Image (tube, helix red, strand yellow):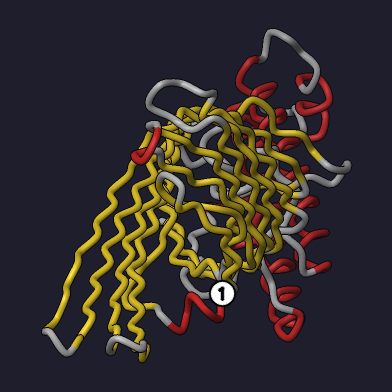
Amino acid sequence: MIKRGGMSVLVFNKGKQVRSNLITNFSAFFLLAFLLMYISVPALGMDQGVTGKSYLLDNLYNPSNKVLTERYSLAGDLLAQADSLDVYAQAGERAPLKPGGGGYYGSKDWQAFIIVYLWLSGLNGETGTGNNVSDVDVSFGDIWENFDIGGQAHIEFWWKRWIFFIDPTYMVLTADNNETRVIGSLRSSLKVKMFLFDMAAGYRVAQIPLGSNVRSNEIKTWPSLGVDVYGGGRIFHLDTKLKLRLDTPLGPVMRNIKDDNGWFDFIVGTRFIFNFTEKLLLTVKTDIGGFGLGFSSDIDWNFATNVGYELPWWGITPYVGYRVLYIDYKDGSGDNRFVYKMWQTGPQVGVGVRF
Protein backbone atom coordinates (compact mmCIF):
# COMPACT_ATOMS: atom_id res chain seq x y z
CA MET A 1 0.00 0.00 0.00
CA ILE A 2 1.39 3.44 -0.90
CA LYS A 3 0.98 6.03 1.80
CA ARG A 4 -0.54 9.16 0.37
CA GLY A 5 0.63 11.45 3.15
CA GLY A 6 -1.58 14.05 4.76
CA MET A 7 -3.91 14.22 1.77
CA SER A 8 -5.07 10.61 2.21
CA VAL A 9 -8.01 11.86 4.27
CA LEU A 10 -9.42 13.51 1.16
CA VAL A 11 -10.18 10.24 -0.62
CA PHE A 12 -13.83 9.09 -0.35
CA ASN A 13 -15.42 6.08 -1.96
CA LYS A 14 -18.72 6.62 -3.73
CA GLY A 15 -20.29 3.85 -1.66
CA LYS A 16 -19.63 5.94 1.45
CA GLN A 17 -21.01 9.23 0.13
CA VAL A 18 -23.56 9.68 2.95
CA ARG A 19 -20.92 9.14 5.58
CA SER A 20 -18.53 11.60 3.89
CA ASN A 21 -21.26 14.29 3.74
CA LEU A 22 -22.06 13.86 7.45
CA ILE A 23 -18.39 14.12 8.34
CA THR A 24 -17.92 17.15 6.10
CA ASN A 25 -21.00 18.99 7.44
CA PHE A 26 -20.09 18.27 11.07
CA SER A 27 -16.49 19.41 10.45
CA ALA A 28 -17.67 22.62 8.78
CA PHE A 29 -20.07 23.36 11.69
CA PHE A 30 -17.33 22.74 14.27
CA LEU A 31 -14.84 24.87 12.32
CA LEU A 32 -17.34 27.75 12.01
CA ALA A 33 -18.12 27.68 15.74
CA PHE A 34 -14.41 27.67 16.56
CA LEU A 35 -13.76 30.64 14.25
CA LEU A 36 -16.59 32.68 15.77
CA MET A 37 -15.21 32.01 19.23
CA TYR A 38 -11.65 32.70 18.09
CA ILE A 39 -12.28 36.12 16.54
CA SER A 40 -14.64 37.22 19.34
CA VAL A 41 -12.15 36.69 22.19
CA PRO A 42 -10.73 40.25 21.96
CA ALA A 43 -14.27 41.64 22.57
CA LEU A 44 -14.31 40.12 26.06
CA GLY A 45 -11.83 42.76 27.27
CA MET A 46 -13.44 45.84 25.60
CA ASP A 47 -14.86 48.83 27.48
CA GLN A 48 -18.42 48.80 28.82
CA GLY A 49 -21.04 50.27 26.53
CA VAL A 50 -19.30 49.15 23.35
CA THR A 51 -21.14 46.34 21.58
CA GLY A 52 -19.36 43.40 19.97
CA LYS A 53 -20.66 44.44 16.55
CA SER A 54 -19.34 47.99 16.74
CA TYR A 55 -16.02 46.74 18.13
CA LEU A 56 -15.54 44.40 15.23
CA LEU A 57 -16.54 47.01 12.65
CA ASP A 58 -14.21 49.57 14.18
CA ASN A 59 -11.23 47.24 14.48
CA LEU A 60 -11.58 44.79 11.57
CA TYR A 61 -9.65 47.00 9.15
CA ASN A 62 -7.56 48.81 11.71
CA PRO A 63 -3.90 48.16 10.86
CA SER A 64 -2.83 48.95 14.40
CA ASN A 65 -4.90 46.06 15.77
CA LYS A 66 -2.44 43.32 14.81
CA VAL A 67 -4.03 40.55 16.88
CA LEU A 68 -7.47 40.90 15.34
CA THR A 69 -6.09 41.41 11.83
CA GLU A 70 -3.98 38.24 12.07
CA ARG A 71 -6.93 36.23 13.39
CA TYR A 72 -9.26 37.37 10.62
CA SER A 73 -6.58 36.51 8.05
CA LEU A 74 -6.24 33.03 9.53
CA ALA A 75 -10.01 32.66 9.61
CA GLY A 76 -10.28 33.54 5.94
CA ASP A 77 -7.62 30.99 4.98
CA LEU A 78 -9.28 28.22 7.01
CA LEU A 79 -12.71 28.95 5.56
CA ALA A 80 -11.32 28.86 2.02
CA GLN A 81 -9.69 25.51 2.71
CA ALA A 82 -12.90 24.18 4.23
CA ASP A 83 -14.87 25.17 1.13
CA SER A 84 -12.32 23.42 -1.11
CA LEU A 85 -12.37 20.24 0.94
CA ASP A 86 -16.16 20.19 0.99
CA VAL A 87 -16.36 20.43 -2.81
CA TYR A 88 -13.91 17.57 -3.37
CA ALA A 89 -15.40 15.44 -0.63
CA GLN A 90 -18.84 15.66 -2.27
CA ALA A 91 -17.32 14.84 -5.65
CA GLY A 92 -15.45 11.85 -4.23
CA GLU A 93 -12.13 13.13 -5.61
CA ARG A 94 -8.67 14.07 -4.37
CA ALA A 95 -7.97 17.78 -4.35
CA PRO A 96 -5.49 18.96 -7.00
CA LEU A 97 -1.95 19.23 -5.75
CA LYS A 98 1.07 21.09 -6.97
CA PRO A 99 3.38 18.82 -9.01
CA GLY A 100 6.11 17.38 -6.82
CA GLY A 101 9.62 18.71 -7.08
CA GLY A 102 11.41 15.96 -5.23
CA GLY A 103 12.18 12.45 -6.43
CA TYR A 104 11.23 10.22 -9.33
CA TYR A 105 7.70 11.53 -9.86
CA GLY A 106 6.57 13.29 -6.71
CA SER A 107 7.74 14.90 -3.50
CA LYS A 108 9.58 11.92 -2.00
CA ASP A 109 13.35 12.51 -2.15
CA TRP A 110 14.45 8.90 -2.70
CA GLN A 111 12.81 5.83 -4.22
CA ALA A 112 13.78 2.32 -5.29
CA PHE A 113 12.16 0.29 -8.05
CA ILE A 114 12.80 -3.39 -8.82
CA ILE A 115 11.45 -5.25 -11.87
CA VAL A 116 11.82 -8.97 -12.52
CA TYR A 117 11.12 -9.69 -16.19
CA LEU A 118 11.48 -12.15 -19.03
CA TRP A 119 12.71 -11.08 -22.45
CA LEU A 120 11.12 -13.44 -24.99
CA SER A 121 13.76 -12.72 -27.61
CA GLY A 122 15.02 -14.40 -30.72
CA LEU A 123 18.35 -13.97 -32.54
CA ASN A 124 19.02 -13.03 -36.14
CA GLY A 125 22.43 -12.28 -37.64
CA GLU A 126 25.83 -13.93 -37.95
CA THR A 127 28.57 -15.10 -35.61
CA GLY A 128 31.65 -17.30 -35.67
CA THR A 129 35.43 -17.49 -35.59
CA GLY A 130 37.86 -17.27 -38.50
CA ASN A 131 36.33 -18.68 -41.67
CA ASN A 132 33.57 -20.44 -39.72
CA VAL A 133 31.09 -17.55 -39.62
CA SER A 134 27.51 -18.80 -39.81
CA ASP A 135 24.12 -17.19 -40.23
CA VAL A 136 21.90 -17.35 -37.17
CA ASP A 137 18.10 -17.35 -37.22
CA VAL A 138 16.80 -18.63 -33.88
CA SER A 139 13.32 -18.00 -32.51
CA PHE A 140 12.44 -17.68 -28.85
CA GLY A 141 10.85 -21.12 -29.05
CA ASP A 142 14.19 -22.60 -30.09
CA ILE A 143 15.95 -20.79 -27.25
CA TRP A 144 13.33 -21.87 -24.72
CA GLU A 145 13.67 -25.49 -25.81
CA ASN A 146 17.38 -25.44 -24.92
CA PHE A 147 17.07 -23.12 -21.91
CA ASP A 148 18.76 -24.35 -18.72
CA ILE A 149 18.79 -21.43 -16.31
CA GLY A 150 18.63 -17.66 -16.40
CA GLY A 151 17.24 -14.49 -14.94
CA GLN A 152 16.63 -10.84 -15.78
CA ALA A 153 16.02 -7.83 -13.56
CA HIS A 154 15.99 -4.05 -13.56
CA ILE A 155 16.97 -2.31 -10.32
CA GLU A 156 16.64 1.46 -10.15
CA PHE A 157 17.31 4.05 -7.45
CA TRP A 158 16.21 7.68 -7.40
CA TRP A 159 17.50 10.52 -5.28
CA LYS A 160 15.61 13.71 -6.04
CA ARG A 161 16.23 14.10 -9.80
CA TRP A 162 19.24 11.74 -9.99
CA ILE A 163 18.91 8.23 -11.43
CA PHE A 164 21.04 5.12 -10.85
CA PHE A 165 20.15 1.76 -12.41
CA ILE A 166 21.50 -1.67 -13.29
CA ASP A 167 19.96 -4.24 -15.63
CA PRO A 168 21.56 -7.72 -15.54
CA THR A 169 20.67 -10.63 -17.83
CA TYR A 170 22.12 -14.12 -17.43
CA MET A 171 21.25 -17.17 -19.52
CA VAL A 172 22.61 -20.69 -20.02
CA LEU A 173 21.65 -22.76 -23.08
CA THR A 174 22.56 -26.38 -23.78
CA ALA A 175 21.98 -28.56 -26.82
CA ASP A 176 22.88 -32.24 -27.37
CA ASN A 177 22.84 -34.02 -30.71
CA ASN A 178 23.56 -37.53 -32.01
CA GLU A 179 24.31 -38.34 -35.65
CA THR A 180 25.20 -41.56 -37.44
CA ARG A 181 28.04 -41.24 -39.94
CA VAL A 182 29.61 -43.79 -42.28
CA ILE A 183 32.67 -44.08 -40.10
CA GLY A 184 30.78 -44.10 -36.82
CA SER A 185 28.47 -42.28 -34.43
CA LEU A 186 28.99 -38.56 -33.73
CA ARG A 187 27.81 -37.06 -30.46
CA SER A 188 27.98 -33.32 -29.77
CA SER A 189 27.23 -31.24 -26.72
CA LEU A 190 27.00 -27.44 -26.92
CA LYS A 191 26.81 -25.10 -23.92
CA VAL A 192 26.44 -21.34 -24.28
CA LYS A 193 26.56 -18.83 -21.40
CA MET A 194 25.48 -15.26 -22.09
CA PHE A 195 25.88 -12.38 -19.66
CA LEU A 196 24.56 -8.89 -20.41
CA PHE A 197 24.87 -6.12 -17.84
CA ASP A 198 23.71 -2.51 -18.22
CA MET A 199 24.64 0.17 -15.69
CA ALA A 200 24.06 3.91 -15.87
CA ALA A 201 23.51 7.15 -13.99
CA GLY A 202 21.29 9.96 -15.19
CA TYR A 203 19.27 13.05 -14.44
CA ARG A 204 15.67 14.16 -14.95
CA VAL A 205 15.99 17.21 -17.19
CA ALA A 206 12.28 17.99 -17.55
CA GLN A 207 8.90 17.27 -15.97
CA ILE A 208 6.26 18.54 -18.40
CA PRO A 209 2.56 18.75 -17.40
CA LEU A 210 0.18 17.21 -19.94
CA GLY A 211 -2.92 19.27 -19.39
CA SER A 212 -4.26 21.81 -16.92
CA ASN A 213 -5.59 19.46 -14.23
CA VAL A 214 -2.22 18.18 -12.96
CA ARG A 215 -2.14 16.24 -9.70
CA SER A 216 0.61 14.84 -7.55
CA ASN A 217 1.44 12.73 -4.53
CA GLU A 218 4.73 11.70 -2.94
CA ILE A 219 5.30 9.12 -5.67
CA LYS A 220 4.30 10.68 -8.99
CA THR A 221 2.77 13.58 -10.93
CA TRP A 222 0.06 13.02 -13.53
CA PRO A 223 -0.72 13.59 -16.33
CA SER A 224 2.87 14.48 -17.16
CA LEU A 225 5.91 13.63 -19.25
CA GLY A 226 9.27 13.04 -17.59
CA VAL A 227 12.43 13.31 -19.69
CA ASP A 228 15.60 11.61 -18.42
CA VAL A 229 19.12 11.51 -19.88
CA TYR A 230 21.69 8.95 -18.80
CA GLY A 231 25.13 7.59 -19.51
CA GLY A 232 26.98 4.46 -18.51
CA GLY A 233 28.14 1.16 -19.93
CA ARG A 234 27.05 -2.25 -21.21
CA ILE A 235 29.04 -5.43 -20.59
CA PHE A 236 28.55 -8.36 -22.97
CA HIS A 237 30.16 -11.74 -22.38
CA LEU A 238 29.69 -14.89 -24.46
CA ASP A 239 31.19 -18.22 -23.40
CA THR A 240 30.78 -21.16 -25.82
CA LYS A 241 31.89 -24.75 -25.23
CA LEU A 242 31.50 -27.54 -27.79
CA LYS A 243 32.33 -31.17 -27.05
CA LEU A 244 32.59 -33.66 -29.95
CA ARG A 245 32.93 -37.45 -29.74
CA LEU A 246 33.19 -39.67 -32.79
CA ASP A 247 32.99 -43.41 -32.10
CA THR A 248 34.82 -45.35 -34.85
CA PRO A 249 35.86 -49.02 -35.23
CA LEU A 250 39.39 -47.93 -34.26
CA GLY A 251 38.17 -46.22 -31.08
CA PRO A 252 36.70 -42.86 -30.02
CA VAL A 253 37.98 -39.55 -31.30
CA MET A 254 37.24 -36.58 -29.06
CA ARG A 255 37.68 -32.85 -29.47
CA ASN A 256 36.80 -29.90 -27.22
CA ILE A 257 36.33 -26.41 -28.63
CA LYS A 258 36.08 -23.37 -26.39
CA ASP A 259 35.43 -19.77 -27.39
CA ASP A 260 35.32 -17.01 -24.77
CA ASN A 261 34.65 -13.41 -25.82
CA GLY A 262 33.63 -10.28 -23.94
CA TRP A 263 33.64 -6.52 -24.39
CA PHE A 264 32.52 -3.25 -22.83
CA ASP A 265 30.54 -0.47 -24.53
CA PHE A 266 30.03 3.07 -23.30
CA ILE A 267 26.39 4.10 -23.80
CA VAL A 268 24.42 7.35 -23.76
CA GLY A 269 20.65 7.50 -23.90
CA THR A 270 17.37 9.12 -23.06
CA ARG A 271 14.08 7.94 -21.58
CA PHE A 272 10.55 9.31 -21.76
CA ILE A 273 8.02 8.42 -19.05
CA PHE A 274 4.38 9.26 -19.76
CA ASN A 275 2.16 9.22 -16.65
CA PHE A 276 -1.32 9.30 -18.18
CA THR A 277 -3.13 8.66 -14.90
CA GLU A 278 -2.17 7.86 -11.33
CA LYS A 279 -1.95 4.17 -12.32
CA LEU A 280 -1.22 3.99 -16.08
CA LEU A 281 2.22 4.77 -17.52
CA LEU A 282 4.25 4.31 -20.70
CA THR A 283 8.06 4.29 -20.89
CA VAL A 284 10.17 4.67 -24.04
CA LYS A 285 13.94 4.26 -23.74
CA THR A 286 16.75 4.25 -26.29
CA ASP A 287 20.54 4.40 -26.10
CA ILE A 288 23.53 4.02 -28.37
CA GLY A 289 27.11 2.98 -27.67
CA GLY A 290 30.21 1.13 -28.83
CA PHE A 291 31.70 3.85 -31.00
CA GLY A 292 34.42 1.52 -32.38
CA LEU A 293 36.81 1.86 -29.47
CA GLY A 294 39.54 -0.77 -29.13
CA PHE A 295 37.71 -2.67 -26.37
CA SER A 296 34.15 -2.17 -27.64
CA SER A 297 31.80 -2.93 -30.49
CA ASP A 298 31.49 -0.86 -33.63
CA ILE A 299 27.87 -0.05 -32.83
CA ASP A 300 25.54 -0.95 -29.99
CA TRP A 301 21.90 0.20 -30.16
CA ASN A 302 19.13 -0.52 -27.68
CA PHE A 303 15.42 0.38 -27.77
CA ALA A 304 12.70 -0.62 -25.31
CA THR A 305 9.13 0.43 -24.64
CA ASN A 306 6.81 -0.78 -21.88
CA VAL A 307 3.27 -0.16 -20.64
CA GLY A 308 2.59 -0.58 -16.93
CA TYR A 309 -0.42 -0.38 -14.65
CA GLU A 310 -0.01 -0.02 -10.89
CA LEU A 311 -2.21 -2.37 -8.86
CA PRO A 312 -3.74 -1.29 -5.53
CA TRP A 313 -1.51 -3.65 -3.51
CA TRP A 314 1.90 -2.46 -2.30
CA GLY A 315 2.65 -0.57 -5.50
CA ILE A 316 2.94 -3.75 -7.59
CA THR A 317 3.09 -2.88 -11.31
CA PRO A 318 2.84 -5.47 -14.14
CA TYR A 319 4.57 -4.52 -17.39
CA VAL A 320 4.40 -5.63 -21.00
CA GLY A 321 6.54 -4.26 -23.82
CA TYR A 322 9.05 -4.85 -26.59
CA ARG A 323 12.84 -4.58 -26.78
CA VAL A 324 15.38 -4.43 -29.61
CA LEU A 325 19.15 -4.80 -29.17
CA TYR A 326 21.62 -4.65 -32.05
CA ILE A 327 25.35 -5.31 -31.60
CA ASP A 328 28.09 -5.30 -34.25
CA TYR A 329 31.36 -6.56 -32.74
CA LYS A 330 34.56 -7.80 -34.39
CA ASP A 331 37.91 -8.67 -32.86
CA GLY A 332 41.14 -10.32 -33.94
CA SER A 333 42.34 -11.40 -37.37
CA GLY A 334 42.83 -14.52 -39.47
CA ASP A 335 41.76 -17.76 -37.82
CA ASN A 336 41.32 -15.92 -34.51
CA ARG A 337 38.95 -13.31 -35.86
CA PHE A 338 35.67 -13.31 -33.93
CA VAL A 339 32.44 -11.84 -35.34
CA TYR A 340 29.18 -11.16 -33.51
CA LYS A 341 26.72 -9.17 -35.60
CA MET A 342 23.28 -9.80 -34.14
CA TRP A 343 19.74 -8.51 -33.74
CA GLN A 344 18.11 -9.65 -30.51
CA THR A 345 14.41 -8.74 -30.52
CA GLY A 346 11.19 -9.77 -28.83
CA PRO A 347 8.45 -8.93 -26.34
CA GLN A 348 9.13 -8.67 -22.63
CA VAL A 349 6.84 -9.16 -19.64
CA GLY A 350 7.55 -8.46 -16.00
CA VAL A 351 6.34 -7.21 -12.67
CA GLY A 352 7.79 -4.42 -10.57
CA VAL A 353 7.49 -3.11 -7.03
CA ARG A 354 8.34 0.35 -5.66
CA PHE A 355 9.87 1.17 -2.28
Quadrant in which the C terminus appears: bottom left
In this image, 50 relative to 292: left or right? right
Residue 166 visible in the displayed image: yes
How many numbered circles does the render carry? Answer: 1
Furthest-right residue in this view: 212
Q: Residue at x 60, y 55 (%)?
A: 125
In this image, 105 relative to 340: left or right? right
Residue 47 visible in the displayed image: no
Q: What SS does tag 1 mark?
A: helix
- Image height check: is 277 above or below 310? above
Residue 113 at what x, y percent from top left? 44, 54
Residue 68 at what x, y percent from top left? 66, 24
Q: Residue at x 54, y 23 (%)?
A: 291
Residue 308 at what x, y percent from top left? 64, 64
- Image height check: is 98 above or below 183? above
Which amino acid type is shown beneath numbered disc 1?
A: Phe
Residue 143 at what x, y percent from top left? 48, 75
Furthest-top residue in this view: 64
Near-viewer residue (78 or 15): 15
**Mark 1 lies on residue:** 140
Near-viewer residue (142 or 130): 130
Near-viewer residue (151 or 204): 151
In this image, 68 relative to 156: left or right? right
In this image, 137 relative to 103: left or right? right
Q: Residue at x 57, y 51 (%)?
A: 342
Q: Residue at x 47, y 43 (%)?
A: 339
Decide: few, some or many residues near mark 1? Use Cα within 10 Å; few <14, some 14-19, many ≥20: some
